[in-house]
Amino acid sequence: MLEEISKELGFEVELIEEGKAKLVVPKMSNYLRPDGVYEPAHAPVFYNPKAKFNRDVAVAFGKALREELGRLEVLEPLAGSGVRSVRYAKEADADKVLAVDVDPLAVKLIEINARINEVEDKVKALNADANAVLHNRQLREGYYDLVDVDPFGSPMPFADGAIRSTRRRGLVALTATDTAPLTGARPQAALRKYGAKVLRTPFSKEIAIRTLIGAVVRVAAVREVALKPEIAFFKDYYVRVELRLDRGAKRVDETLSNLGYIFYDDKSYEVVVSRGYPLPEDIPRGMRALGPLWLGPLSGPLAKKVEGGVKPFVEKIIKEDEVGVPFSYKIEKVASILHTNMPSPRLVLLRLRELGYKAVITHYDNTAIKTNAPKEEVFKVVKELSP
């Protein structure tokens, strides 16, 4: 079978398993970098095995959404090899999946993978440009419950089209792999792509998540569309957000009330959170501003309905939201400011809880703690526990 498919496509393929799906992808050993690591961008059709967890979460939320709505129609405008689309059909029981790719070879591979998994009646492959489909109701054949955009780099060029294509109560799911701008390593690029001032902080990964949400929320507001996170996280090399869509000026105003700024001083680790958009309500002196960004929760009601292998990870983010602060304390940085040795973050966590504060290790950094304790209390505990 693989030999016949290789001849049909014009490149060597292999069979892999992901989730409940069996999938044909370009033979990865043929596309290695000089250091011997597989480079997805070198393959004739895109497939990234490192994005498996991203797809696991996507499918879990797709399944939960289907159970809630009683149906699931999915649009994937950058489908590549079709792994995600096939998994939506096979594992989330999607009624319909429109898998779009501008590359005719990718479309062929999507059709092959749909056939292998016996979901060809659910998955339709379309050879077209992503934005052409997102912005054309006839071309995309209506509206969808879930639009999943997983590009190379920033999803912002596709954000408006994804919003236009999504039904009320549906999910707009976006992945951003350009983490350098989002974490403050390239502030000018962040300003161009996300319309926000982003600088390096000890909690840059959280800033990345909140910058992306804030940017998409502002795009949606122009169309009087309100977006709120059902899940948002930083993992490995990407930021992933799944945003619930609703309509109406009042809902948009409510959503915009969750935008604001974080002011940070690197010498003292002083953090001031100030709501307000387009301008913050309070502007402290002598501190660097980051924003506008999302200051609300990173999870929603659907997150509590998610089952399967990703559930413990999702529950971690739910617990972070319960703390109620949009930043964290990196224990190494606190110890550095105090000129002392770094204690175990786990011991700091337990001590803060003993003192009656909420405290959790973050999902994005196992040496960072999110807590509602005052800064002075955190510093005092770190100093006391320093070995």
Image (cartoon, rainbow, N blue to C red):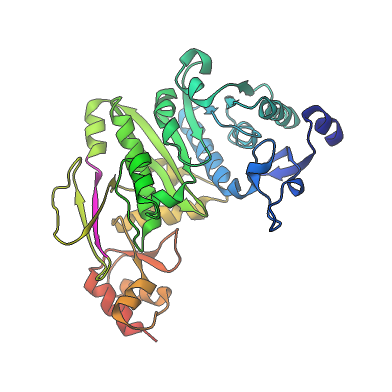
Question: Residue at horizontal 52%, vertical 18%?
Answer: 140
Region rendered in magenta: 257-265
Residue closer to the observer: 1 or 305: 1
Residue closer to the observer: 311 or 378: 378
Can see residue 19? no
Quadrant for the C terminus, please.
bottom left
Residue closer to the observer: 315 or 337: 337
Q: Is residue 82 toward the left or the right of residue 212 in the image?
A: right
Is 341 colored magenta in this rendering?
Answer: no
Q: Is residue 366 above or below residue 318?
A: below
Can see residue 211? yes
Residue 117 location in percent, x, y?
72, 32
Residue 221 location in percent, x, y?
28, 30
Question: Residue at horizontal 30%, vertical 35%?
Answer: 218
Question: Residue at horizontal 72%, vertical 28%?
Answer: 118
Question: Residue at horizontal 34%, vertical 61%?
Answer: 201
Q: Is residue 42 above or below residue 386?
A: above
Q: Is residue 44 toward the left or the right of residue 336 in the image?
A: right
